[in-house]
Amino acid sequence: MLFDTHIHTQYSTDSRMKIEDAVKEGKKQQLGLVITEHMDLDYPRPEAFVFDVNRYFQEYEQYRGDSVLLGIELGMRPHVGEANRQIIAGHPFDYVIGSIHLVDGLDIYYEEFYRNRSKQEAYNRYFDSMLECLKLHDFIDSLGHIDYIARYARYQDPEVYFRDFAERIDQILTVLVERQKAIEINTRRFDRQQVVESLLPIYKRFGELGGRWATIGSDAHDAAGIGKEIAAAREIAERCNLKTVYYKQRVPIEQ
């Protein structure tokens, strides 16, 4: 079974999707699902992007099985690394995504992060933070949406081009390779061909450096987004000599 490994339901602050609707859509598409709720500790807005992990497992355990797995998307920041580690060590997650959503205490969704910064300056800081956090979060399974900044950046051309950030991206990919981690092919922006073309060299480089595994995630926050452009992601993985996997009990399973 093919898995969509990045799904948010109502335990995530920015999603209202019910688990029942996600499961129904997964069955309709004959897709396995990994639920990955947001956990961004010390988010600037109190009680946003955190959830009760014990309650999450208690409520969703009844849905867990061969086609529905329970994971988490951790917001990686240097000062919450140890607290993140304790969350993972204390709970039976199937899968752990490590993502960058905030840099220097600023949510890169908002304009403030980009103010008075050139694209090169903002993206350099983003990738520097990503590298620092990856080194501290050796307990994740996959690096989430390496191009996340391009969703919200306030520049005429927000895409991430490998040639412009090669040195920094190489360092990030090398850490993933050395620690035998996966990289996520996040399909949320795949409705534009320019996005796919800009990301392809990054995934190709990951394979060249010795990367083995890619996870595929729609980053869906509603039922309509589940399974989005999964075929395109599989094609990218094949072109880059990467095996697509999902995780069950923290073990990669080829699909």
Image (spheres, rainbow, N blue to C red):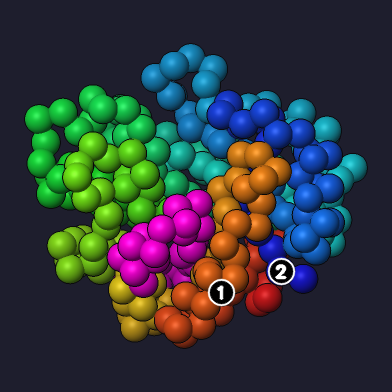
> Residue 245 placed where, x, y %?
62, 71
Q: Would residue 54 be found to the left or right of residue 175 on screen? A: right
Position of the N terminus, as image quadrant, is: bottom right
Query: Which residue is painted at 23% across and 37% down in the image?
Result: 154
Check disc 2 and report the residue beneath it.
2
Q: Is residue 8 magenta?
A: no
Q: CA distance from mark 1 to mark 2?
A: 10 Å
Position of the C terminus, as image quadrant, is: bottom right
Instruction: State which tag comes first along the sequence, 1 or 2.
Output: 2
Q: Quadrant of residue 107?
A: top left
- Identified by mark 2, the residue type is Leu
How many other residues sit within 10 Å of disc 2, few (<14), some (14-19) or many (≥20)? some
Q: Residue furthest top?
A: 46
Q: Quick one: SS at disc 2?
A: loop
Is 189 situated above or below 183? above
Q: Is residue 188 magenta?
A: yes
Q: 141 and 31: which one is in front?
A: 31
- Whether the residues at callouts 1 and 2 have beta carbons within 8 Å, the answer is yes
Magenta residues?
174-200
Query: Which residue is painted at 36% across and 44% down in the image?
Result: 151
- Say which mark, if any, is on residue 191: none
Q: Residue furthest right?
A: 62
Check disc 1 and report the residue beneath it.
234
Q: Would residue 254 be found to the left or right of residue 197 on screen? A: right
